[in-house]
Every structure is written in C-alpha cells, then in structure tokens.
Image: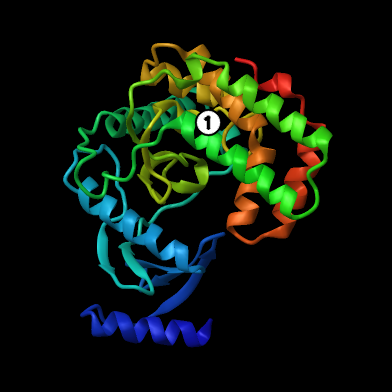
Amino acid sequence: MKKCRKEVAAAICRAGLPVQKIKYLASGDDSDVLLCDKKWVVKLPKRQEVKAALQREFALYTFLCQQPLPFRIPQPVYICDDFSVLTFLDGTHLSYRNYQRLCESEKEALAYDEAQFLRALHGVLVDVGVPPLCDAAEDKRQRLKREQTEICGILDNAGLLSNVLREKIAAIYMNLFSSQTLFQYTPCLVHNDFSADNLIFRNDRLYGVMDFGDFIIGDPDNDFYCILDSSRDDFGKDFGRKVLRHYAHPAPEIAERKAEIHESYWPLEQIFLGSRRRNAAYIRQGLRKLRRLDPKAFVF
C-alpha cells in the first residue's frame, strides 16, 4: 500500500493536483480508498471489471453536478484507467446506537433530510439515450431471470446444486415472478445502495451522499430497502417508516413489503456477488442461509 500511495501521489501531481499528504481511508469489496490532503478521495479498483464501474460513476457525478440536489455529493476531479479522484465529503457516519440517542424531533429532522434527498434524486429528469444513463435502465424481471440462471450455474459448477436445492430456487423465483405489484413502478434515477454507510452527517443532520456506483434507472422503492431493513446496519424499520412519511410515498405498505422481500433475498445475492467477487466464503454463507430459506417469504 505504501508503494501504491507514492505511485498515486505522483500520478495525481502529474494531473495538476499536487498532494502533500496521502493516507489509507478504507477498503471495500471493489476498491481501496485513499484520502489526499483531506480534499480528495482516490478510488483504486481491485478488479478489471470495477474500472468500468468507476468510469460510469464518475460520469454520473458530472451529470448530477448540474442538478439541484438538496445535499452534497462528491464532485468529479480526475479519472484515468487506474483510479478516480473525487472531492472529499468531510463529515461523519452515524451509527444505530448514536441514532437511538437522538430525541424524537432530531430523528424526525433526519428522516426529513433523507426523504428530501430521495425526492429530489427521483425527480431528476433523465434521458436514457444520453451517457451516462444510456446503459442504466433496468428491467427488474429480466435481471431476476438472469440471476436465477447464474446462481444455479454457480452452484452446479461447484457441485453444490442438488435436486432439492434446484426446486427450492425455482419456487422462490416462481413466487417472485407471480407478483404484479413488484414489477409495477415508474422508472427514475435510483442510488440503489442508499444506506447509512453511504451517507455523511454533520451535527446529526444529513450533509452528503456518496457511492453512486450501483445507480440504475429503475424502481424508486429500491432506495428504501436499506432504511427499512430490520437489522442495525441502518437506523431500524421505524426510521424507514418516518422517511416514507416525509417522502409522501403513495403506497408505503408496498415499499415496506418490497424491502422485506429484498431482505429475504440476501442469501441468493450473496451467492451471486460471491461469484462476481471471487469470494468463496460469500458463496458458502449464502448457501447455508438458502438451505433454511422458505420460498413463501417471496409471496407478495
């Protein structure tokens, strides 16, 4: 990493951005992240396919800079084949425990902030014929069909796909595809990973939103999945309901049911992502949970 820092610092200087101090900030599944002079964030992709995703995310930031969003997002600074440079959002993350310490009015204010951002993002006018949005439209039904085929292939190639497991996977997807409501929505620009990990706070209020790498033109309810999660990764389902109310969601019970289905779907997604990221432990964890999964959890 030390050598990597020196190489990145030299490359940034050559791009006209002199750097005095560079330090390791974080490591995700797809990229390592460095912080330069507390001004810029440098993302270094871990795999070849992640490079294209960084280019796509960088282009989206360029587009979003022209939109009237109510909170900050990273600004694009520089990109090359080996890394991207974005402005640093200087704030803090907020944990479940710290959120629970807030008074009720502070919780409401925070929910209002998140709802305002999502309403603005979902209201951005998009032209799917123009980059970076031209390849962002998602057909949810087709995506699920592809994932079903790929998940069965992953397990089959590993010698893990028994007839019982194949039938369970088929039942899960049959229940998903039988839903009409799940596939009825007006497509819009969706962050697609709107979780506390990707939000920056100041004084217990929302300050900025980052990590748009998974963005799509798709179902706006995707952006409520994490905040309606029953785990403590975010702030709890009650907070998610506050966000839905401030967002003025026309059918909050449908958004909540979609979030429950998405939460149940996680073992399948673990297998899918484990293969993409070459992470055998992810696949094993997903398989253990899949064996215990009830296909009726996917009935809408």
Position of residue 129 in the picture relative to residue 248 (left or right) = left
Q: Is there any visible trace of residue 91 in the rendered image? A: yes
- Name the residue rendered at 28%, 50% in the picture: 60
Q: Identify the residue at the far left of this view.
A: 66
Q: Quadrant of residue 6?
A: bottom left
Label 1: which secondary element = loop
Q: Looking at the image, which is closer to me, 46 or 139?
A: 139
Question: Mark 1 belongs to which amino acid?
Answer: Tyr
Q: Which residue is mark 1?
A: 225
Q: Looking at the image, which is closer to me, 229 or 101?
A: 229
Q: Quadrant of residue 70?
A: top left
Residue 105: x %, y % from top left = 46, 23
Can you say whether 243 is above or below 138 in the image?
above
Q: Callout 1: 10 Å neighbours few (<14), some, many (20+)?
A: many
Can you say whether 61 is above or below 79 in the image?
above
Residue 58: x %, y % from top left = 30, 58
Q: Looking at the image, which is closer to me, 85 or 137?
A: 137
Residue 162: x %, y % from top left = 82, 40
- Name the residue rendered at 68%, 26% in the picture: 172
Position of residue 292 in the picture relative to residue 88 (left or right) = right
- Name the residue rendered at 73%, 44% in the picture: 286
Q: Quadrant of residue 120?
A: top left
Q: Looking at the image, which is closer to me, 119 or 255?
A: 255
- Name the residue rendered at 19%, 45% in the picture: 130
Report the colour scheme. Answer: rainbow
Residue 233: x %, y % from top left = 61, 40
